[in-house]
Amino acid sequence: MRLLGLVIFLWSVAHVLGNTEIVNFEAQETVSVDLQFTRSWYVPVLHSGSSTLIWNLTATPVGFSTSDICPSLGKWRPDDAESMKLCPHELWLALDLESDGHWKNFNKFTLRLSWPAFFPTDVSMKIYDPIDLAAFSENPQSISSHATSRLKYARLRLSFAGVLSPSAPPVPDGVPIFIILEPLFFGVLMPSVIPTILAIVVIVVLGIPTGIKINSYLQKIAQLARQNMSTSRKSD
């Protein structure tokens, strides 16, 4: 039991050092859309062969709305400093769930974003189908009614959640974030937690024989104590 407690304690410590936001979504096939601006639109792509990303993202000022999509989305490029000024407080990702076939049998996925706990930040994450971005294309009518796709887009936005005083230092320019895309086993289990679950199961299974032996030993001691007490009473 002590070893089990140690495992749980270490797992808990690893998770209190940072904040995490999670969005789960279904990988349903949708109508394939040929969006002109996405042909040259460089965005980080997450897929089974590269499912993690480390990035620095600027949080929005206090009171800044995070609900509206940047109107200059078609011109936004995270690899271009001037372009980033158009939409400085958001990051778009392409979620490729089908290209190499490794994730074709998974219907549910989770997108997880973590950041250091000492950054007072609120996170907004939303998943879009390609057709949702058709309004930002110069040719939004180019929709194929036959082809389907499991490609998704994710929009990530950070907003500053701290309390500023007149003498407070400026808000940091960038918040370091860690992003990971994972399939969900049985629709609920993330691959990253499976080793922890297996470790707990192994500890419990190995602990059962030990527990049985200890219980048997204690039962013998208790029985011997009862016999001694009974003998003592008879002698009195």
Image: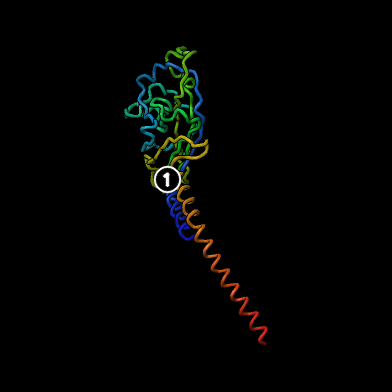
Q: Nearer the viewer, residue 41 or 14?
A: 14
Query: Which residue is label 1 attached to?
Result: 119
Image coords of residue 111 (percent x, y):
46, 35
Q: Is residue 226 above or below residue 34?
A: below
Q: Amino acid at mark 1?
A: Phe
Q: Residue at x 42, y 24 (%)?
A: 73
Residue 211 image point, x, y percent: 52, 61
Asked if residue 166 shows in the view, the reply is no
Q: In terms of depth relative to the viewer, which is nearer, 159 or 183?
A: 183
Give the residue displayed 32% in from the left and 29% down from the top: 79
Relative to residue 59, is residue 227 depicted above or below?
Answer: below
Extreme residue in the bottom direction: 236
| Count of all numbered marks drawn on residues in the image | 1
Residue 226, image quadrant: bottom right
Residue 44 sits above or below residue 232 on the image: above
Q: Nearer the viewer, residue 7 or 73?
A: 7
Judge the density around disc 1: few (<14), some (14-19), many (≥20) Cα neighbours within 10 Å. Answer: some
Q: Secondary structure at mark 1?
A: loop
Q: Is residue 210 visible?
A: yes
Q: Splitting the image into 4 quarters, where does residue 88 fall?
A: top left
Q: Quadrant of the C terminus?
A: bottom right
Image point 57% across, 70% down: which residue?
Answer: 220
What x and y, as percent, mark residue 153? 44, 27
Q: How are the colours assigned in the image?
A: rainbow
Where does residue 80 sit, x and y in percent of width and height?
32, 28
